[in-house]
Image (cartoon, rainbow, N blue to C red):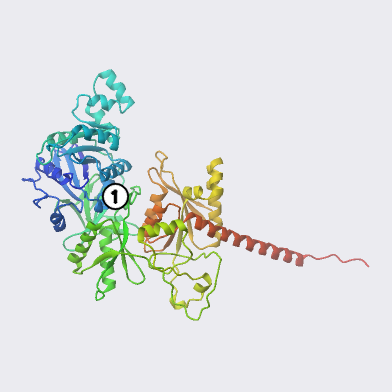
Amino acid sequence: MAPSKKLTIGLLAHVDAGKTTLAEALLFAAGVIRNKGRVDHRDAFFDTDAQERERGITIFSKQAEMKLGDVEVMLLDTPGHVDFSAEMERTLRILDYAVLIINGKDGVQQHTETLWRLLEEYRIPTFVWVNKMDLAAVDKAAIKSELETKLSAACIEYGSEDFDENVALCDEALLEKQLEEGSLNDEDVAEAIRERKIHPVLYGSALKSDGIDVLIDLLQRLTLETEYAKEFAARVYKITRDERGGRLTHLKITGGSMKVKELICTGENEEKINQLRVYSGEKYRMVNEAAAGDLVAVAGFDNTYAGQSLGAEKPGRISALNVGKLRKLSYPETVNSFKFIQSMYQLEEEHPELQLYVTDEKEVLLRIMGDVQIEVIEQMVLSRLGIVTHIEEYVPLVIEEAIEEIEEEVDDRVDLNSRWLPGQSGGGELDDELKAIFERTYGVQKQQLHKSAVQRETISSSKKREIEKEYILVDGYNVIYDWQDLRELSRINIDAARESLVDMMCSYKSWTDAEVIVVFDAYRVKGGTQRTEKYNNIYIVYTGEAESADTYIERTTYELKRKCRARVVTSDTAEQIIILSNNAVPVAAATFRKELDSVIESIRDWMDDYNISEHLNNLNRLKLPDNDI
């Protein structure tokens, strides 16, 4: 019998809330496992990695197939420790529903609130499971108050006498129906849940399986299957390697279908599907075709990455979480740097939150969330490569290249070629704001030396790098509100301010070789889709619904990573850090305005010279009439 619906359901929680225990209870009730495992016994179905069993925490997201009656469910267990939040977040784009687990003993914790904000941002319908209610110290009334104040007033206890009434109060149409008919049916409640107008709350004990049958009943009755388009579309959420080192692309099909041996466009080229695997825990089964709603691992793709959209799928945000702190990965001098770095790039494919960066001196820099992640990464490198590494604090140095027989010069001109990256030779002075954020993030710089544009021009050609294609991405509204003249103009007419910025960037483009892209937020436009326009000599991007300019810029710089040079103009210091981690160069809006004004001044000087020259040429071409004598 065909399933009535197909769902992908994720379990999310703060560490130690009992998430893995709940997963075991659900799998046992569904008949997937014969005995319930325990984290402390190191035999949980999902905790298959040696480090997970040793530490008693979930580090990697896992999935399991199960059937709840005639509902086909792919259950995802995600990390609860904050150090591995990025691994958790990657699963959010593929979820149909989420179950948020609250530790009844500890209540709503700070990380729980972070999870809730992410669920809101990704618009994921959510059931709330309050766990460990069998403990004597649990105060149900206090928990209910926390849920309503810290999460949402729409968190409603399922099974309470006034459940239907509280549901109706969350929607005007439901309230009218409740008043007219006296009750609500399952379809009404299911639709309210899908639209995140209500969040049913259940209280129970996963360890003792108290309330599990009620949760399963709700997942069967009060969920709705996602409607998918016929055109092929998919969301890549994870890259892994199997026991033989084969590269696997984990994705959810969100439209159409996929078949073995089929060619799929994964970027600039088409790649062939060699295998389609459906994983459940450590094991998998092979299928020849997968349809919309399925989660599969594809063997044969070499150019995919986590967060990528394939086919007709709309682009999504890379990450909404803190990117962590920049640290240095030290490795023995005897190790072949080239092979080691290539292996680290493979590791970064699986864990893109590391945001690997290699300096000219072959230093390997990583983004790290915390001490537990440090230990996990060091152990991971050791087990895979047999190399002992050490992750330590990193303080970036701006080092001046050795220049022989050059006189020290003072040049107050704006340096249009200035660049600054950790561990690289740099250019102009950082503005105070950006310098402060770098020092808070990376520590105080030990040395900062600069050389003028004139000096850089004298560096021997053997020391110059090959010039790469450059992109300038401008966060449109951010810049408008940062520049005083445009900010004042925007108060009168925002369209005029936008047009003024665009015209300025057209002038800038006419004087430089960089590709200019100005990005404007349109994420609040209901039903809006991303569009790109060519305006004179630059490009203008208007983002789609639920996608900010930051999101577009983060994704674009990530895709340009290691391919070309990119600079991003924004005054958002948090965004500057993310941009830097994508190997792009952040430029504060105020700093870029000086550069832009200098370019415009150069254009004016050239025009003045040109006009004078043309005037003289015109005079020379004048033929004076002969005078009669």
The residue lying furthest to the bottom in this view is 405
Find residue 17 and report its horizontal and vertical position in percent.
18, 44
Residue at image coords 36%, 58% = 441
Residue 48 at what x, y percent from top left?
13, 54
Number of residues whose C-alpha sits closer than 10 Å to that of mark 1, classed few (under 14), some (14–19) or many (20 or more): many
Residue drawn 53% across the image and 62% down it: 512
Q: Is residue 428 left or right of residue 556?
A: right
Q: Which residue is mark 1?
A: 235
- Counting every numbered tag in the picture gives 1
Residue located at (37% from left, 65% from top): 396
Residue toward you, 411 or 519: 411
Q: Quadrant of the N terminus?
A: top left
Helix, strand or loop at disc 1?
strand
Q: Is residue 2 visible?
A: no
In the image shown, does 112 or 264 lie closer to the viewer? Answer: 112
Q: Position of residue 420 (x, y in %)?
A: 43, 64
Residue 163: x and y in percent read 22, 26
The C terminus, quarter of image: bottom right
Three-letter code, disc 1:
Arg
The answer, for residue 239, to whether it is visible in the render is yes
Asked which quadrant contains residue 115, the reply is: top left
Q: Nearer the viewer, residue 148 or 156?
A: 148
Res 268 quadrant in image:
bottom left
* Residue most extreme to the right: 629
Left or right: residue 617 compared with residue 558? right
